[in-house]
Amino acid sequence: MATGELKRIIIDTDPGIDDAMAIFLALQSPEVDVIGITTIYGNVYTTLATRNTLHLLEFAGRTDIPVAEGSHVTITKGTKLRIADFVHGTDGLGNQNFPPPNGKPIEQSAAAFLVEKATLYPGNVTVVALGPLTNIALAIELDPGFSEKIGQIVILGGAFSVNGNVNPAAEANIFGDPEAADIVFTSGADVLALGINVTHQVVLTDADRDKLAESKGKFAQYLCKILDVYFSYHRDAYDIKGVYLHDPTTVLAAVNPSLFTFAEGVVRVQTNGITRGITIFYNKKKRFGEDTEWSNKPTVKIAVTVDAPAVVELLMERLINS
């Protein structure tokens, strides 16, 4: 496949065990060309997210991919961040304490890098956003034309008609920066969101992990080393013998949307009170008489169903053949 036909993607990420899995999956996907990775807080603080990203790329032998460091604070300059190190280990990668990477991030900020690439390849870059949406909202603020220039923004975020995973209202990535999320959802960009209503259907089981461990795959072997912490968290928090594949599923939605079905409507994010971070999807089935915060807002797509066995099979095959 010539580069002209490859889907150019930038991954915005906070590695994170399932982020590591998603990055490896993207690198193993012949349909895409990863043209850069931007970092954000979430599973770990931004500085560590950058370090982990550089480490993962070094392990993968892909130091040619530029890494742009993202924001250390929310879009409203909030510094009290919710960091999920209890899910991924204090180092974000299963407490393996890998040696520091040799690489450095580029001078450009994540937002400037996103704007530059969207301008260079108008309509031809997909951002796969695996953390809070601060960097993407900053790119929209930096360049009002960004929403038109960016091909697609595929978001892991939200909990549509189900409970959240930070509290009953909110999912972690949206809760991480609700103001930024609302900017992105109402920006007019081509947005595709995968909420935990979909990603919770995609589970990597103990048996799958054993298959990865028995394989010769370089990435499969690496992931088996770091997965322990993640499995025990899921056992305690959800009482399941497996882990949810949030991030890899989102990468595959960018690569192969035919594995999903989508609904189109307006999404707004509540930014205060007890439901701060909740994502409300308006299906446009009813026409309301009065002008509201929902009127004349651009529509986005949200994932409604997923072919979970196909997603797991594709992930396994690509990691095993690495």
Image (tube, rainbow, N blue to C red):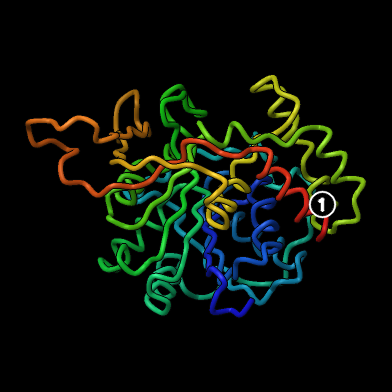
Residue depicted at 70% across the width and 29% down the height: 233
Quick one: quadrant of the C terminus?
bottom right
Residue 114 at least partly seen: yes
Residue depicted at 87% across the width and 42% down the height: 211
The mark tally for this picture is 1
Left or right of residue 68: residue 215: right
Q: Position of residue 241 (x, y in %)?
A: 75, 25
10 Å crowding of disc 1: few (<14), some (14-19), many (20+): many
Seen as rendered, the residue at the extreme top is 239
Residue depicted at 40% across the width and 65% down the height: 151
Q: Position of residue 177 (x, y in %)?
A: 39, 43
Front residue (pair 103, 160): 160
Q: Secondary structure at mark 1?
A: helix
Quick one: quadrant of the N terminus?
bottom right
> Which quadrant of the figure has residue 141?
bottom left
Residue 81 at least partly seen: no
Residue depicted at 60% across the width and 32% down the height: 201
Q: Position of residue 245 (x, y in %)?
A: 64, 40
Front residue (pair 52, 199): 199
Front residue (pair 244, 311): 311
Q: Position of residue 116 (x, y in %)?
A: 41, 75
- Residue bearing mark 1: 220
- Up the image or down, 20 lies above or below 262; here it is below
Left or right of residue 120: residue 91: right
Amino acid on which disc 1 is placed = Ala
